[in-house]
Each structure stands twice: as C-alpha cells, then as structure tokens.
Image: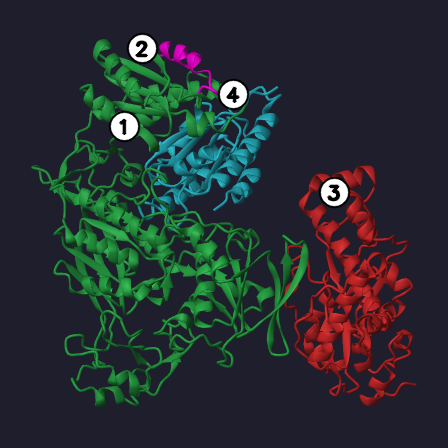
Amino acid sequence: MSKLGYFPGCSLEHSALEYDQSSRYVCRKLGIELVELPDWSCCGAHAAHHTQHKLACALSARNLSIATTLGLGSVVAPCPACYSGLKFAQTALKNDPQLKEKFKNELKLDCNAEGKVFSLVELLSQLAPETLKAQVKVDLGELKVVAYYGCLLVRPPKLVQFDDPENPSSMDDLLTAAGVQMLPWDYKVQCCGAVLAVSNPDIQLKLSGDILQMAKLAGAEAVAVACPLCHANLDLRQAQINKYCGSKFKLPILYFTQVMGLAFGASPKELGIDKHMVAAGPLLSKAGINQA
Amino acid sequence: MKIGVFICHCGNNISAAVGVELVARHALRLPGVVCAHTIHHACSEPGQLLIQKCIREKGLNRVVIGACSPRVHEATFQRVLVQAGLNPYLLELANLREQCSWVHEDREAATRKAIDLIDMAVGKVARLQPLLSSKVDVNKRTLVIGGGIAGIQAALDVADSGHEVVLVERTPTIGGNMARMDKVFPTLDCSACILTPKMVELATHPNITLHTYSEVEQVSGFVGNFKVQIRKKARLVDMEKCTGCGACTLKCPIKAPAEFNLGLDKRGAVYIPFPQAVPHIPVIDKSICTYVLKKKCGLCQKICPTDAIAFEQQDEVLEEEFGAIIVATGYELMDWTVYGEYGHGKYKDVITSLQYERILSASGPTGGHIRRPSDGKEPEVIAIIACVGSRDAAHGRPYCSSVCCMYSAKYAMLTREHLPNSRVYIFYMDIRAYSKMYEEFVQRAQEKYGANYVRGRVSKVFERNGRLVLQGADTLLGQPVELEADLVVLAVGITGTASTIALAKKLNISHDEYGFLTESHPKLRPVESSTPGIFIAGACQSPKDIPLTVAQASSAASKVLGLISHDKLETSPLVAEVNIRRCVGCFRCLDVCPFSAIEEQVLRDGSKVARVNPALCQGCGLCSAICPPAAIALSGFTDDQLISQMEGLCSQNPV
Amino acid sequence: MQPEPRIIGFLCHWCSYAGADMAGTSRMKQPASVRIVRLPCTGRINPLLPLKALMDGADGVLISGCHPGDCHYREGNLYARRKLELLHRFLPFVGIEPKRLRYVWVSASEGARWQTIVEEFTQQVRELNQTLEGYPSEGGKASFSNEDNVSSSEDKSF
C-alpha cells in the first residue's frame, strides 16, 4: 500500500505512546508508509465541538490542508476522536463548497475535498486477510480476546460508514487474521464512561466495570481496544473499578495494534506493552510469548 | 367569442397572496373576454349561481375559472356549465391556489404569475370545442384482490347485493393477517371466532368465485370494462377430489419453516397452512418437494385415499372481465433485523408481534401456552418494545403504525391471563389510543392487569447469563434503566408490500415510497385509487386496525355498487380523433398506442387510414405526438389549443 | 435587477401535476417562475411544443412525467424521454442552450422533489440569463459553440 498522512494526535504523543509505537510497527510490517503531518495541531476534541462547529471544522481542516500541501491523498488517525474530527471536517468541506471557499480565502486552508480520512482499523481492514496472515510469525491461537470498539469508532453511522454501528466486526476480522481467538460478545460499542471519569467518576467506574464484567462472562483473557480514552478508563482505572464494584478484575487491556504486533513477532517491549497498568505478563507467558 | 373570467378568493387562500381584483381587471383587457368577476368561494352555491347567471345573461360561450387545482373541482365547475346550458368542455381552469398562492410569498410575483396563468387559460379556452361523450356498457362483475379481512368484507358486501364477485388470493388460503391473530382489541374477542365464519360464508356464497393460490397477471381496459388475466398456480392437489383429510400432510417427510406461524415451527412440503384454512385443501410446495425436484418419494400420492395428488397439474391462466376492481392486499411487518441494537435477529427470544400472536393462539405452535422459542420455557418477565420501525426517520419509517400501542396493551392483558405470575413491561414513546373504547382499554391494561409502562426507548438488547437484558432510558424518571427479561416482543411497524407495488404497476395506480397505495383524495375520496373503477381498502392504503379496515372495505364496496348500478357509463370525450383527409396511412400511431385503440379503416377509394376506437382510447396523446402529418388530434389537448395557451403567455409578455 | 425568468412547465396530469399540487397543499415555497401547462401524459409532447415555447421567448422549459414504470398510460414517459433526448441534442443547432430544457420525473407524492427541482432549474436559467446580459441579442438566445452543448446532456435527472 502507498503513502499516507499520519495524524497521531495528542494522546499518542503521551499517555498512549504505546498505541503510536505499535501502530507504526504494524504499518511498517504491512508496507504502509506513514508520513507524520509536520506541525500538526490539536483536533479540537470535545472542547471545540461543543464550542462551535466551524471552529472544530477549522482545527481539523488545518491538519487536512497540511496533508494536501504535501500531496498526500489520504490521512489516517488511530485515535477515534481525532478520526471523527477529521472525518467531520472533511465531510463538511465536501458538502459545503462555500465553507471550503471561506476557509481557503480567510484562513488560507486549502484541503483536498476528495481525499479520504481513515481510522487505523478501517485502513487495515481494506487489506486482504492474506496480506495480514503472511506477516504472522507467532501463533496466538491460545489467546482469547474480545474486541471493544467503543462508542466513537463506528459512529455516528451517517458519518462513519465502514462498519455496522451496533455490531461491528472489522477489528474482530483483523485480529482473527492475525491468528487470535476472537470471542463474540455484546458490549462492543457500549460506552466506557469517557470523560465522565473526570467530572462524574462513579458513572464511569460503573460503565467501565460493566464492560469488564461482560468481557469476563464472554470468557476473554484480554480486551483489544482502538481508543486511548477507552484504554485509560479500562486499564489505568481498573484498580479503581475493582474498588468501586468490589470486583477482582485483572484483565489486560491491549491496543489491537499491540496484539497484531505480537503476532507479527515483535517483543512486548517494542510494542510498549510493559507500559500498561494491568500487567499482561502472566497472559503472555501462558500464550507462550517470550517477554524479553 | 364571449369569454367569462371568474377569479376565486377561496376565502383568503388565494387572495392572501394574489391581488385577485387586479387579475380580474387585467382579464377584462384580453381579447374575447366580456366579463371578469372575483368570487369569494366559486365552488359554493352563491359562487356557482353567479357563474350561471353570467353565462345566461351575458351569453358566455367560454368560461375561465381561476381557482384551485382542476384535480379538486374541475368536475364541480363542469356541472355548473351544464346547468347553465353550456357544454362542460368549454371550461378551462387556472390553478391559482395549489400552484400559485400557496407556494409563493412575494405578492407581486404571485400576482404576476396569476395574470400569466389567466392569459394562458384564456388563450386555450378560445380554441376549445364542445365535446360529446359516448356511452359504454358496464360489466357488473367485480374483482377483489386480496383475501384478508378487507377483501372478505368487500367481497361479501358486493355479493350480498346480488352481484357477481371473483376474489383472488395469492396464498393457499384466505384469512390474511387477521387469521394469525389470537384475540383482538378493544373487546378481546377471539379473532378466529369472528373471522372464520366470514371465511366460510365467502367460500360458499353463491355469487362469489374464489381463486386461492392465484395471482393477477395482467390488467387492461378501463372503468366498467376491465380485462384481467388471473394465474391459478398449480396446487398439485386436485381440488375436486381432495376431502381435506390431511393424511398427506402428516406423512410428508420434508420439513420447512411454516409461513403461517412465521417460522416458529415447521410444515411439510405438502401442507394446509392452518386448521381453519379456506379452502381446507393442501398445497404442495414445489420448491422443496423431492418428487417435484427429483421424482423421489411420492408418499403423499401413495397414501391419499381419494387419489387427489396431481403432480402433473400445470398453472392455469384465466381471462375474465370485470366492471370494477377492489384492491385489498394488506400489509407486512417491516424488516426489523436492520435494528442492530436488538441484535439483528440473532437472539431467538426476541420475536415480532405477529409471532407473539401465534404463540398466544390456541391453534399456534405452542397450543396457546406461552413458551419462549429458544428453550420452550415459560417466560417470567416479558418486555414489549413499541415503535420498532414506526416513527423512526433514521430507519426510513417516519409514520406511525397506528396499531402497536393497542396490541401492546392487549399483549399485557393476555400474557397476565395466561401466566398470572409473569411481569410485563412495555417500553413506549407515546400512547396513542384514539378510537372508541381504546383509552379505556389501555387504562385497563395498566390498572387491572398491572402492565408496567416505561416511557423511553430501549437502546440495546443483549444476552447475559441466559437472559435477555434491555438497556434503555426511563424518560419520566430521567434515569437509565436496565431490565432482565425472558422474552422480548418487538411491536414491529407496518409497511406496504413489494407484491402490492408490483400489482399497482399492473393496475396503473399510484403508491408511495413505503408501498402503500395512494387514494384519490385523502379526505373526500379515501377509497378511490388514481384510476377510475379501481378502489382500495384496508392496510394496503395505510396502516390501520380491524374496525377501520372493515369500514373502509364496506365503503369501497358501496362505491363499486354505485358504479355498477349503472347499465351504461359515459366515457371521457378527451380522446384522439383522426382527420382522414390528412392521414397518410403510415400507422405509426398503431405502433405506439398502448391500448390497441387504433384500427385500420379502408376508405371507398381503397386507401387505408387510421381510426380511433373511442371506447378503448384512454387519451394519452402518444399517437397525436407521433403523427407525421399531424392528422391525429387529442380532444382538449390539440396542438392549436396548447400553442394558443403558450402564446397567451409568451406573446403578450415578451421577454 | 433581472426579472424572474419565465419558465413553461409541461406536466403530466397523473403524477407530476399532482406532485406540484402536493407541493402546494404542503405550502412548499418556490420561485414564481414556472407556468404549468397540464397534459394527460408527457408522451403527448410533440418536441415542437417546447421548441416553440423557447423560440417565442420562454427562458426555460421544464417537463415532468411519471417515474419509469409508473406511467398511467404504461410507457408514455419513455416515449417522451427518447424524443426529448433528441430535442436536447438538437437545441444547439438552432442556437438555444440545451440547459434551458430539463426533463424530470416527479411522482404524485413528491411535492418536496418538485420544490427542489423548481428551485434548481430556476437558478440554472437565471444564471444562463445573466450570461446573456451584455450580448446585443434581441430576445433571441446567444448561440454557444457545439462542443459546450453536446457535453451538457448529462445534467438531466434521468
């Protein structure tokens, strides 16, 4: 596959560094060249969206115009919030030539309205399963995993159209191709509580606890995620969840790119798995992965 | 030429946006116009009298009325002309309401357009000629399409008046969706008890011929004289010999999901849809019968005591003639599996409302005991989700299904009667109980039967530890709710059917995007289709309950009786006419005529020219547009009339 | 300020005329540009009628019939399509922009669609009229080169 603009976003620079590492690793292995957009800026996240639509649009349009300047047709964003922001802006510019013209004249932002914005899951889903299977070096057939998509990756349905908004399967297909045992479950798109962790932690702990509970009931040994915020809520706050719910979860939460990386033969350290709060060590030993 | 122009205020519907006095003053300046008046309501009695008075006193011989759409009142004003002694076809209407005052806000622009429309109408009316209609015989037979409660009621009403009726039903039995139901609101009488006697009455009625397992293949003709081809599909069972003993259905080794029970149980390849089916004669499913497919088995043939199995039977196509047609093809439930939040259909214990009717029914797959499909256990908690596929624009169903509120309350009552220890929850958006005894019915479900009404949508249904979990919101409490249930019944919305759309195309009647047939006027002509002589009844027109369906069926029947009470019918004189002095006999008109109304005519000198059969001509004008020497004119829409109409606009107001 | 363009509409009685009425009963506001001539069927249209309208000074001609398969007379709309497709290609030869002619399908329940079509087509004709300003033409239409016109036949909504 060809060259794409890469928009890591703020989380992947810091709290979700391992998502960045593993994404780059998987793409490198699959022959996808990621060009990090130089001087990219914040996607605006929730704050911009809730303040003003046009502002949210302009913030993402700036990043899209950087890609256009570099002659990059498409942009990929691993973080669902960044993806949503970029996709929203791109769709708005495509449907509203006046807005596009306004941005061009007043803000000097020239975006390619025909370019595509991908989430990383979407991008990798476009590869033939054989391409993925060809890279698999380590058998993860013993590993039982559920894929947790979160609320934003496949929604809103009218904007994001690459998967079923209620029962998505793209991440399951990717990891199945990587040789992992994917388990069916019903909480693929349930809310993890998101930023309520800050303002209303009780609600977030309950919602995230429910997700871990359902994953356990499904028989999962690990949860694969594609969102830095989901990861933080399920991994970083797992101890708090246990305290709040009176549970004893010790469920490793892995980015789906980390799971793919393991199958492709990377060491857990290379993929940043050692950075997680819930240790994945015991699980990996059981799966027969050398943790050096 | 003495043209009178009348501009209607229509209360203030027209005058609010159009300067009607100005338009009338303008009209007076037009050539041939001898009087121009404004009228508050041209269609009212004083309005009609004024027009007649002007016609008589001023000796008008052409009339232009600027009022509502000709689709609304053309016939009314034609009658006004007739009463004043004028030929009704010397009238031209200018549509100043639907296509002018109602769609324009700028008064000046609307007035200018109204003036243009009057110019055009005056231009055309000056060229109109008096036309005389001819008369054709009316066939007194009626075709009813669809054997649900609507079709049954309509057929019986027409037949009871002594006229002959043919009823065509697509499936092997009549009864329709009502036959699937257990008890019906608001009286909770047993559906079979009130329906099956009617089914039998229909089958034995001396004036009714019943064709089940048959479809309408082709329709031609016009009001009073329809020609219909009916395909009687091969049942592979001789209806004369079969006694309906059902021995074959018990022995058939093939199994397939039973349509009548909506897949809740199985039937054989030879089957009778349900015990009270009419006719009570089995049918062989050709798509699965191994004898039909590979000439193996033939067990039914061996055991049939009357030798009624007839594998050699072929489809039969009947040609029949009718004066009127009633379409009563009913409804379907929409495909609810588009709802991912309810599991796309992967949970066995999430069922539709019609499936629940079958579970409740004593003749259903569980013998009337409420057992859930997955493991046959009695459910303790039953949740009903209303408005699945109704009032949901996101899934392309913005309309209300009109019956779900009521049958949800019914399910609560019936469930509690069957299982007194059960709990029933109904998730609803609003309760719409608008008809006689309906509100009381819902109250009874809540107060006497303890139905738990939760106002809010269910956002997700999933399985946890063998039970179904419903997550949603209680918008009255303002809280998220979670409920564990054993059985979830979806009150699935009603939609028109693909087969109705296909039929509508054959009949040339209009339908909407959901597959419901369109009535001629939503208030004043609710059972007439867009094509004269074809009437609609029941849920094929819009979602409706049984009382309303029956009322509409009787209404359609009375319309048919009104039509066939005439021996002769006036045909529209707006038909094509050949000028034999211009006709060169190329017969391109004959090629394009969709109704075979063009005939060859040999003149005395031996040359051949075209002739139009006015009884067959429907007045589309295809021949007139294709005729190279312009020898065919469509009355009311001739070239010089249309050109004069256009010139009324273009020449007087040059760009 | 330019006057509102004057467009002649040829509408079939069964679908499109009812659709335009539907827009009216639903009070769907639209530019006051279209003057409708009611016909039994678009199949009745002799191409000379729209041509004459354009030659006589109409700024545009909008023709609307039933959707394919819905024609009250079975296939009159399909005959109309063939004739108007040819007319569309012929217009450049007499010096009329083909964009002044549009042929659409509107059913009896599509009031909103009719509203949109009137808005779009009026705008299209307005723009054509604007390009005429400055031409020393006397009511006639400026002639365009052949190349421009042949390619514009896709803009109809068949």
Quarter location, residue B279: bottom left
Tell me the quadrant of the picture where the N terminus of chain A can be found.
bottom right
- Labelled pair 2, 4 in contact (Cβ < 8 Å): no
Q: For residue B345, which numbered disc appears in the image?
A: none
Q: Which residue is mark 4?
A: B109
Quadrant in which the C terminus of chain A appears: bottom right
Chain identifier, green in the render: B
Q: Secondary structure at mark 3?
A: helix
Q: Does residue B25 show up magenta in the picture? A: yes
Distance between mark 3 and mark 2 Cα atoms: 58 Å
Give the image's coloring scheme: by chain
Q: Quickly name the residue at label 1.
A: B76
Q: Chain of mark 3?
A: A
Q: Magenta part of the protein: which range?
A: B15-33
Q: Amino acid at mark 3?
A: Lys
Lower position in the chain sequence, tag 2 or tag 1: 2
**Mark 2 lies on residue:** B35
Q: Amino acid at mark 4?
A: Ala
x, y percent for residue A71 = 80, 55
Neighbour tally class for label 4: few under 14, some 14-19, many 20 plus, Cα within 10 Å: many
The residue at 75%/39% (across/down) is A101
Q: Chain of mark 4?
A: B
Was residue B618 drawn as part of the magenta stretch in this picture? no
- Rendered cyan, the chain in question is C
**Under tag 4, what secondary structure?**
helix
A114 vs B210, left or right, is right
Amino acid on which the number 1 mark rests in the picture: Thr
Q: Which circle's residue, 2 or 4, is located before the other in the chain?
A: 2
The answer to which of A107 and C51 lies nearer the viewer is A107
